[in-house]
Image (cartoon, helix red, strand yellow):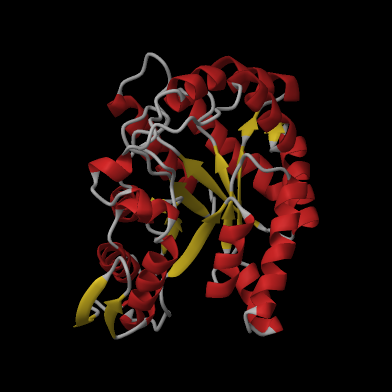
Amino acid sequence: MRVGTFLLAAQFPGQGHSEALHRAVRSAEVAEESGLDSVWLAEHHFVPYGVCPSAITLAALLLGRTSRIRVGTAVSVLSTAHPVALGEQTALLHITSGGRFTLGVGRGGPWVDLEVFGTGLEAYERDFPESLDVLLRWLRGASVAAHGERHRFREVPVVPRPDELIDGTAAPETVLACTSPKSVRLAAARGLPMLLGMHCGDEDKAEMVSLWRREALAAGHTPDEVARIAAGHVSAGVAQIADHTADASETLLKSVPGWLKHGLDAHVTVDGRQRAMRDPFAYTELLCRIHPVGTPRVAADRLAATAERTGIRRFALMVEGSGQVAGVEENVRRLGSEVLPLLV
């Protein structure tokens, strides 16, 4: 089982941007010190839900500050980026880190970001599969041309080539954030493992994994390929470790609802459509019930149960729930020193 942290650089009420970013960087360093497998970085624009606007940039910093741990994006939003630019950045990090970088990509939302970056609503609603295909061809080929509705350019060489890593490692690991049957089918057809969100419980994730497997086989992937790719699925969740389960839940219930309301209310849609936001307190209660929130034994049992029910054995756990640097650091250390040994 591979357990990592999921960092949003969340700005809790009363905090500044620099405090949130410092906490995220320090948490990643502690994750490596504590023996965790990976660090996953979120990307958001113009909202305090998360103040990291470029997950791949922060990944570059953390890869330079660490030597062992994998660093991934969860996710880089392809709807506001050019796939070739993202592919070049991915290849650069893949090679210079010795293969420790994972690119997580997603469609994002219908936010004002699409207006600010000039990509438009079509990049979100229509053109994501085309952009994904250009990106994947860039990561897997020697030269790329595009003749689609959104991307049109002559054939150009891929520089640097991701497959020229000195130790012979293949193309960079790429995962796709999946929130609907449509995105699950897209991941399956393209042979990509899924990143499943922390809002989903085990039953929903198991259904998505089952759908992915059926669609991957239908797309022509062999059973061996399907098993190999499926081993890369990632389950996002929340982790809060305490001596008593009630104390872990109380920590999150005191801080997370304020952050959620503060952050989610700030989202603005590009076309004025109304978006229903979850009740922050009820959502936090849900997270406490379905994720590794509690004593080390409870946390380990919940992770093991999710692995058993879904088949997913990689985890990206949001550890920033207390909102405080010292509290988050302690949470990460306990995850490594007290929960991981129980999963062996």
Q: Residue at x 70, y 61 (%)?
A: 209
Q: Can residue 1 be seen in this view?
A: no
Q: Where is residue 11, by image quadrant?
A: top left
| 100 with respect to 114 (left or right) | right
Q: Residue at x 70, y 29 (%)?
A: 286
| The C terminus sits in image quarter | bottom right
Residue 216 in picture, x, y percent from top left: 65, 74
Q: Where is residue 225, by image quadrant?
A: bottom right
Residue 262 in picture, x, y percent from top left: 44, 20
Residue 101 in picture, x, y percent from top left: 40, 62
Give above or below for 120 relative to 320.
below
Q: Can residue 326 be seen in this view?
A: yes
Q: Which residue is drawn at 46% across and 68% down?
A: 173
Residue 341 in picture, x, y percent from top left: 69, 49
In-front residue for pair 137/329: 137
| 240 with respect to 50 (left or right) | right
In-front residue for pair 211/2: 211
| 136 with respect to 238 (left or right) | left
Give above or below for 17 relative to 255.
below
Q: Residue at x 29, y 78 (%)?
A: 147
| The N terminus sits in image quarter | bottom right
Give above or below for 132 relative to 16.
below
Please tell me how many numbered marks the rendered image carries.
Answer: 0
In-front residue for pair 90/62: 90
